[in-house]
Image (tube, rainbow, N blue to C red):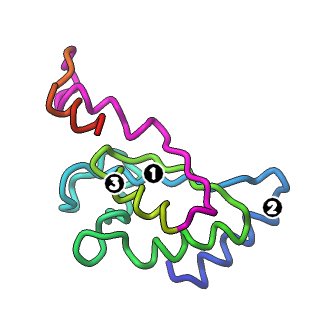
Amino acid sequence: GDAENVAECLSQIDSASPLMRGIRWILDYVGPFDGNSATHVNAARKDIDYLRGGEGGTVTPEFEEGFAMLSQYDFSFDAQLAPEQLPAMAELASRYPEVPVCLNHVGKPRLVLGPYSNATEPDEYVLTEWKE
């Protein structure tokens, strides 16, 4: 949504409980965004890779604007994302050091088994890429 809507939502969340500490967002997209590369149903519903769907494969301006607002509420950001998105998340986080970031599932290491769910041995290429 637009920045005004995000600010209103964050304000409501903040006032709902003194225990609120952060926002979790499922951003999972693998490979280049094509509208069908979501690895989680929640990301598929959004139909956009917020971390790489902006101009030139960058963070979308709307997402970055909302991310920046988290510091106003002392909220952290919990990111569930794919390994391919880690560089974009790192770049975004570096621009807003006042927003603590938690990487859920450490960039989805399940993908080191390769593209097939029945794989039992790590795909060395994918594993090397994930480690970087």
Vertical arrangement, residue 44 with respect to residue 10, above or below? above
* Residue, disc 1: 26
- Identify the mark nearer the N-term, 1 or 3: 1
Inspect the image, locate mark 2, and give the three-letter code of the amino acid beneath it. Ala
Q: Residues within 10 Å of mark 3 (few under 14, many from 20)?
A: few
Magenta span: predominant SS is loop
In the image, which disc is placed on residue 87?
Answer: 3
User: Which element is circle 3 on?
Assistant: helix
- Identify the mark nearer the N-term, 1 or 2: 2
User: Which element is circle 1 on?
Assistant: strand
The one of 70 and 23 positioned closer to us in this rendering: 70
Residue drawn 37% across the image and 37% down it: 108
Look at discs 1 and 3 and give the one toward the viewer: 3
Residue drawn 18% across the image and 61% down it: 34
**Alpha carbon separation for disc pair 3 and 2:** 33 Å
Q: Are marks 3 and 2 in contact (CB under 8 Å)?
A: no
Q: Would you identify the image quadrant in which residue 46 lies? A: bottom left
Q: Which span of residues is magenta-colored? A: 96-120
* Residue, disc 2: 16
Does residue 20 appear to the left or right of 112 in the view shown? Answer: right
Residue 33 on image: x %, y %: 22, 60
Residue 40 on image: x %, y %: 36, 45
**Alpha carbon separation for disc pair 1 and 2:** 22 Å
Does residue 2 appear to the left or right of 127 in the view shown? Answer: right
Vertical arrangement, residue 106 with respect to residue 49, above or below? above
Q: Are marks 1 and 2 in contact (CB under 8 Å)?
A: no
Q: Would you identify the image quadrant in which residue 111 lies? A: top left
Inspect the image, locate mark 1, and give the three-letter code of the amino acid beneath it. Ile
The one of 6 and 69 positioned closer to us in this rendering: 69
**Alpha carbon separation for disc pair 1 and 3:** 16 Å
